[in-house]
Image (tube, rainbow, N blue to C red):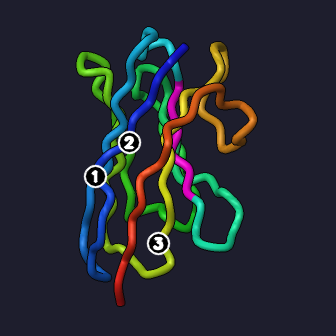
């Protein structure tokens, strides 16, 4: 069982930056590919970014490519999402997730076994 806790959310102005963190416990963090998803108000959850267990492979949604960067520190059991050039449409609850063992980088939510509780990011115009 992996327990995930996101942090770093808050209110930011358009054009600004924010870094989200996701602290993992209860499992071997380095075994899992990890992902970030978000749920904008009134919309369904959507994929944001994913990273392989070693951090050598990353994958981004087109909407954030070039603006967001996913990384991980396996020595600290922590996943990060660096967000830059934020837009009002990036406003959402952001979730980190750990993929099922044996699953690589993926944008499919059902391939993730463990989820955090989410952290709200609000981008003001």
Badge 1 marks a residue whose secondary structure is loop
* Residue at the image position 44 percent from the left and 30 percent from the top: 4
Which residue is identified by label 2?
6
Is residue 61 positioned above or below 40 on the image? above
- Relative to 121, 101 lies left or right: right
Q: Earlier in the sequence, mark 3 or mark 2?
A: 2
* Residue at the image position 47 percent from the left and 48 percent from the top: 118
Q: Quadrant of the N terminus?
A: top right
* Residue at the image position 36 percent from the left and 51 percent from the top: 69
Badge 3 marks a residue whose secondary structure is loop
- Mark 2 touches mark 1? (CB < 8 Å): yes
Q: Which mark is residue 91?
A: 3
User: Where residue 113 sits: x, y (%)?
Assistant: 65, 26
- Point out the stretch of residues depicted in magenta: 33-38
Is residue 39 positioned above or below 108 on the image? below
Q: Earlier in the sequence, mark 3 or mark 1?
A: 1
Q: Which mark is residue 8?
A: 1
């Amino acid at each position: 069982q992996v327990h995930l806790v996101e942090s770093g959310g808050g209110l930011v102005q358009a054009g600004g930056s924010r870094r989200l963190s996701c602290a993992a416990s209860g499992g071997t963090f380095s075994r899992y590919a990890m992902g970030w998803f978000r749920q904008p108000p009134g919309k369904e959850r959507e994929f944001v970014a994913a990273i392989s267990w070693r951090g050598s492979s990353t994958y981004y949604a087109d909407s954030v490519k070039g603006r967001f960067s996913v990384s991980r520190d396996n020595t600290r059991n922590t996943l990060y999402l660096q967000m830059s050039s934020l837009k009002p449409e990036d406003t959402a609850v952001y979730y980190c997730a750990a993929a099922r063992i044996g699953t690589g980088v993926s944008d499919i939510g059902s391939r993730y076994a463990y989820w955090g509780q989410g952290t709200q990011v609000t981008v003001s115009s």
